[in-house]
Structure formats: structure tokens, C-alpha cells
Amino acid sequence: MADVYAAIAEAEEAVQERLAAVLERRAADHQQIGMLRAYLADLELPDGAEALEIGCGTGPVSRELATRPGIRRVVGVDPSPVFLATARTLGSSLPHLSFIEGDGRSLPCSDSSFDAVIFHTTLSHVPHPQAALAEAFRTLRPGGILSVFDGNYSSTTLATGDFDPLQACANAAMDALVHDRWLIPRLPGLLREAGFTITGQRNFGFVETAAPDYMLTMVDRGADVLAAAGRIGPELATALKNEARHRIASGSFYGAIAYCSMQAKK
């Protein structure tokens, strides 16, 4: 199954609305907030900086940027009008924050118009990420900063041992939700090819055990994907979901994803 985010503007409106709620729920997670604030703290921006977030979704990262001192303007761009409607509503109290509809591989922005460009869990969903990085390079001012934060989704695990059946759910969910699970290992080469100089990197771990939320959705989504593809029957899909909930109740559930941020200059 193809990554729904890779062509989000073509998805049914109900699907986009459901995903908009998922994006805001994920953004409210304390581990996600901690990772976001940690890598944003690495950005050395001039006073009065103007920042662009490519693939802003419902806008939680753009909102966080817009509250930082010294930021004069933040623009979020996304191809989904449904996501942008939510972003504009939630960001309406921030006067120097705006949102525009567009594709990150062909931005409706002028050359050399921003001091910083952010990709937050976006680039792994983009077919031909080289085009998006080229657009980021074009829109950055000389000396401008690029920051990419994404999951190393090849690391996604629900397993507690060899041959764990829940790992099939993790793999299927990643196939359905991410265009390129191997983006992070390839990212240094992609950045250099686009003309950037890498200046820093951070590694993060996202783990859920006792009270999983996001990782439990991986179980359910993965089981549904496997059943829809005819690879397992509905009874087994239900059993996999029940197994995850049994592990939660018994205190043996484990789910994890490695994340990375990389910073570069034009």
C-alpha cells in the first residue's frame, strides 16, 4: 500500500481530516515535544529571522517556531487544503504566522527569501526528495540554515524477541505510512548533492511501553494493511491487535522508533 502522505491532497477529505487529528495528537506527545524543542534550540538564527516549514501539516512546528524570540515571520506550506484549514485555525492568534498551499518540490516562494527552512517528519514522505532539497536551497538566503528532522523508520520495532508476530504489523504500517523508510541513512549524501554543508546532527529515541498511544496505532494499522492485502485473514488481524493489548495489560508491550535531526548551511 502506498504512503498516503505522499499524495495527501488526492486523499478523500474524510481521510485527510482523520490524519489531521492524528498529526495534532502526535504533536502533543511529550516525547515528540522534547525532540522538537531540542533540535530547534540548535538553530542559530539572526534577529528578525524568516523561516519556512515545508510540509507543515496542521502547523504545530510552525506554531512553535512563531513563538520563539527573534523570529519575524514564519510561513508553513503544505499540499493539503484540509490540513491548512486546521493550521490556520490553530495558528490564528500568531500574527506573524501564515500558511500557503503548495508542493515542496515546486514552492510558491521567491529565491533567497528565508533564513531557515525546516522539514519535520516530511522528507521521508516525499517521492524524489532531491527536488524538495533543491527548492529548500533555492529559497534560502546565503548562509541560511536547513534543518531536517525525521524518523529512521527502518528501525521501527514492536518486537520483544526473534520472530515476534507484532513486527509484521510494524513493517506493514511503515510500508503504508512512509515513502522512504531509509531516508535518514541516505540523508547526508542527499544534502551534499543538493549543495549543503552539514553542520550538526542529533539522534533521538522514541519509546512507548506502559501506556502506548502512537505505537499502538502502528499495530492496528499494520494488522489492517495485512488483512486488506489478503496476506492474513481477519481473525489473525484481530488476534494481533488483541496480543498488543494483552502485552499492555501485562506490562510487556514495547514499541520504538529512532529519530534524527540534521542541520546544514547553504
Image (cartoon, rainbow, N blue to C red):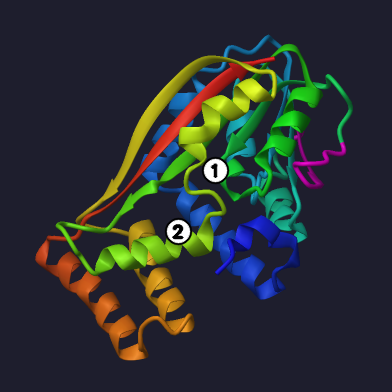
| Residue 266 x/y as whole percent | 70, 14
| Secondary element type, mark 1 | loop
Q: Which residues are magenta?
A: 95-108
| Residue 175 x/y as whole percent | 48, 61
Asked if 246 appears above or below 75 in the picture, the reply is: below
Task: Inspect the image, locate mark 1, and give the three-letter code of the amino acid beneath it.
Answer: Thr
Q: Which mark is residue 174?
A: 2
Query: Within 10 Å of the Cα at label 2, are there few (<14), some (14-19), or many (20+) other Cα atoms?
Result: many
Query: Within 10 Å of the Cα at label 1, are there few (<14), some (14-19), or many (20+) other Cα atoms?
Result: many
Dominant secondary structure of the residues highlighted in magenta in the image: loop
254 and 75: which is toward the camera: 254
Residue contact between numbered discs 2 and 1, judged by CB atoms under 8 Å: no
Task: Inspect the image, locate mark 2, and give the three-letter code of the amino acid beneath it.
Answer: Met
Point out the frontmost of discs 2 and 1.
Answer: 2
Residue at the (19%, 60%) spot, across then down: 253
Labels in figure, total = 2
Quadrant (top left/top right/bottom left/bottom right) for the N terminus: bottom right
Going by the image, does 249 lie left or right of 166?
A: left
Answer with the quarter of the image where residue 91 lies: top right
Q: Which mark is residue 171?
A: none
Does the rendering let one see residue 59?
yes
Asked if 162 appears above or below 107 in the picture, the reply is: below
Residue at the (77%, 32%) spot, across then down: 135
Q: Per the image, is 104 magenta?
A: yes
Q: Per the image, is 51 magenta?
A: no
Residue at the (76%, 53%) spot, across then down: 79
Residue bearing mark 1: 121
| Secondary element type, mark 2 | helix
Going by the image, does 161 lie left or right of 227?
A: left
Residue at the (77%, 58%) spot, across then down: 81
| Residue 115 x/y as whole percent | 72, 18
| Residue 50 x/y as whole percent | 74, 22
